[in-house]
Image (cartoon, rainbow, N blue to C red):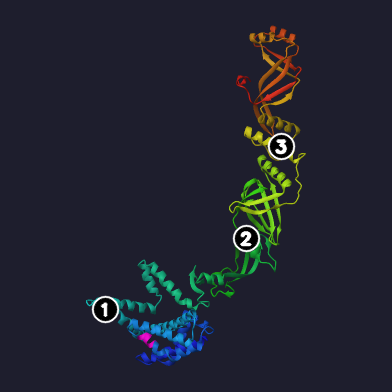
């Protein structure tokens, strides 16, 4: 079909040249020139898809028998209106001959005729011997239009208009001139050079094997294929194939049925390619321009896979209770069986959540959580979460941005391991430790065991912080006093058999997990009496002022001892 149309259009151009030229041109040369020129036009490709849509033979009959006279008017008339009318008449007659009966088919016939006319006209523009005659019609029209604008138009104005047309003629003969480019560069007309280059590339783009989907472009010292439209890029996506070896780290990829690009993406590993040969493709077709990749042969290339989609914020709930209010989950890996591993490693927290789900088994997700190097507060939150989850089993991973569950359902039974007698005891221990940390603004190690002695200290101190007072028992206590006259008188007033409520403030020093804690405590003995009262009384009378004496108290009927951190004001100065 291509040869048929080329033959008719070339014949038509030959007849016009014979009838309208001032001298006879050799038929063989003109036919060859016309055919070569017509087949080089980018618009010509559009004609080859009409055979099944219209009466193609009818269109050929019109081109071969009736278009000659019409096209003579179209090409040579000095009046633009006559040329426009002739063009419309030609298209209408072609539609009639082709039997086009829908708007789409009529438009396609119109496009064919319009392209045919432009092909003939462009041919004459390229022939130096004929061009003066062809373009003269435009020059006459230009002069006529200028004269009609004003009866007082000067000859200079007419010449200016004519010179514009002559410049256009010159430009059509030479799309790109090195001398002209050098001149433009000297004058700083860089944009003009760019426009010239683009025109040049557009002109040669008709030679691209896949035109009009692709054109010829220039980048980094090489001619390349560039898609003309986004649709072309989608229909023929660029790709490369290479011969060589692929490895990930030091391990070579040897799976004959696998795809190393897929493997690199799924495991987020850089792909190292030892290249022997490279070839580019546009879709399934070889790219005609390979120079820009030819230099890759013999080199080692590293290709990083596309990153997984960004992390999405979630909260972790059991039932309706939120335990972790902001967790950033992201795909970490896609295993070879298609299982997605989703976790929050990038969050760099103490807790690592991991969800494993296979699209082929969406009803069987696997949820894991583990704690590493978290604080006592972190461990407390983790143990509470796991304890509640083991009881209620209603897990929800809630998407914060979308306001809906990403994953929700009842989990299977699991055993919660603890180093204490029970999980509740571990929770109580961690709560007490966190209470002490907050009160004294300290941090204790969260890993390792705890001795019975330290455990008792934790219970006592945390109770002092939490409660108004704590109650214990006592047997006896010894104090040191400094002898003064006031001390003698106070001691003398006491009877050996009298029961007393003895209260005093003292500074307690406790070492816990290598941290020294210091705090003031008010202690009260509910019932106390002085042991060996008579002996103590006589000894005090013999001592000089300033000398010390030890006095021992023992519990009487009530051996309760009360401690509190809430010290009344009257005791504040007592140490």
Would residue 571 be found to the left or right of residue 475 on screen?
A: left
- Is residue 120 part of the magenta span, yes or no? no
Magenta stretch, main secondary structure, is helix
Q: Is residue 394 visible?
A: yes
Query: Relative to 311, is 97 above or below?
Result: below
Query: Which numbered marker is on residue 369?
Result: none
Q: Give me the residue at 66% from left, 40% from top.
A: 377
Disc 1 and disc 2: Cα gap in Å?
73 Å
Query: Relative to 121, is 286 above or below?
Result: above
**Secondary-structure class at tag 3:** helix
Reading the image, the residue beneath label 2 is 270
Crowding at mark 3 (Cα within 10 Å: few <14, some 14-19, many 20+): some
Front residue of 530 and 253: 530
Question: Residue 281's x, y, as percent?
Answer: 58, 72
CB contact under 8 Å: marks 1 and 2: no
**Secondary-structure class at tag 2:** loop
Front residue of 62 and 170: 62
Would you identify the image quadrant in which residue 507 lies? top right
Would you identify the image quadrant in which residue 301 lies? bottom right
First in sequence: mark 3 or mark 2? Answer: 2
Question: Residue 485's x, y, as percent?
Answer: 64, 8
Crowding at mark 1 (Cα within 10 Å: few <14, some 14-19, many 20+): few
Reading the image, the residue beneath label 1 is 148
Q: Give me the residue at 39% from left, 71% from top.
A: 181
**Secondary-structure class at tag 1:** helix
- Is residue 74 part of the magenta span, yes or no? yes
Query: Relative to 485, is 312 above or below?
Result: below
Residues in magenta? 71-76
Q: Give me the residue at 69% from left, 7% from top.
A: 541
First in sequence: mark 3 or mark 1? Answer: 1
Reading the image, the residue beneath label 3 is 428
């Amino acid at each position: 079909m291509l040869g048929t149309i080329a033959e008719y259009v070339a014949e038509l151009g030959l007849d016009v040249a014979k009838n309208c030229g001032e001298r006879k041109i050799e038929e063989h040369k003109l036919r060859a020139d016309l055919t070569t020129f017509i087949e080089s036009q980018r618009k010509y490709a559009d004609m080859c898809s009409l055979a099944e849509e219209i009466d193609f033979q009818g269109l050929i009959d019109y081109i071969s028998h009736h278009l000659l006279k019409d096209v003579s008017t179209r090409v040579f008339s000095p009046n633009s209106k006559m040329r426009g009318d002739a063009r419309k008449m030609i298209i209408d007659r072609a539609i009639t001959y082709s039997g086009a009966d829908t708007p789409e088919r009529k438009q396609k016939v119109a496009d064919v005729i319009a392209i045919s006319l432009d092909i003939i006209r462009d041919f004459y523009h390229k022939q130096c011997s004929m061009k003066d005659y062809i373009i003269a019609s435009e020059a006459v029209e230009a002069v006529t239009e200028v004269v009609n604008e004003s009866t007082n138009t000067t000859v200079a104005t007419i010449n200016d208009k004519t010179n514009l047309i002559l410049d256009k003629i010159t430009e059509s003969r030479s799309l790109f001139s090195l001398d002209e480019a050098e001149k433009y560069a000297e004058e700083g007309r860089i944009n003009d050079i760019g426009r010239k280059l683009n025109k040049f590339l557009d002109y040669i783009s008709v030679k691209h094997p896949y035109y009009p989907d692709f054109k010829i472009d220039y980048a980094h010292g090489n001619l390349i294929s560039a898609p003309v439209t986004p649709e072309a890029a989608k229909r023929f996506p660029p790709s490369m194939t290479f011969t060589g070896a692929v490895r990930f780290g030091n391990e070579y990829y040897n799976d004959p049925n696998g795809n190393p690009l897929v493997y690199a993406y799924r495991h987020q590993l850089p792909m190292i390619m030892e290249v022997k040969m490279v070839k580019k493709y546009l879709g399934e077709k070889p790219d005609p321009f390979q120079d820009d990749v030819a230099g890759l042969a013999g080199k080692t290339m590293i290709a990083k896979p596309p990153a997984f989609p960004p992390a999405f914020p979630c909260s972790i709930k059991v039932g309706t209770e939120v335990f972790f209010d902001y967790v950033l989950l992201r795909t970490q890996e896609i295993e070879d069986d298609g299982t997605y591993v989703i976790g929050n490693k990038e969050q760099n927290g103490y807790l690592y959540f991991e969800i494993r789900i296979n699209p082929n088994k969406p009803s069987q997700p696997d949820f894991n959580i583990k704690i590493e190097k978290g604080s006592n507060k972190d461990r407390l939150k983790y143990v509470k979460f796991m304890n509640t989850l083991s009881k209620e089993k209603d897990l929800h991973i809630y998407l914060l941005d979308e306001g809906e569950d990403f994953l929700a359902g009842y989990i299977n039974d699991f055993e919660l391991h603890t180093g204490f007698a029970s999980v509740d005891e571990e929770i109580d221990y961690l709560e007490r430790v966190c209470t002490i940390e907050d009160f004294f603004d300290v941090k204790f190690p969260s890993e390792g065991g705890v001795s019975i002695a330290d455990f008792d200290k934790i219970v006592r101190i945390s109770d002092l912080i939490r409660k108004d007072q704590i109650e214990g028992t006592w047997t006896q206590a010894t104090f040191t006093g400094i002898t003064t006259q006031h001390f003698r008188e106070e001691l003398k007033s006491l009877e050996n058999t009298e029961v007393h409520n003895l209260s005093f403030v003292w500074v307690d020093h406790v070492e816990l997990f290598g941290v020294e804690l210091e705090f003031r405590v008010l202690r009260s003995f509910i019932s106390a009496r002085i042991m060996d009262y008579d002996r103590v009384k006589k000894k005090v009378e013999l001592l000089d002022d300033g000398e010390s004496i030890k006095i021992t108290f023992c519990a009487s009927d009530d051996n309760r001892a009360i401690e509190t951190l809430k010290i009344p004001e009257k005791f504040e100065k007592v140490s």
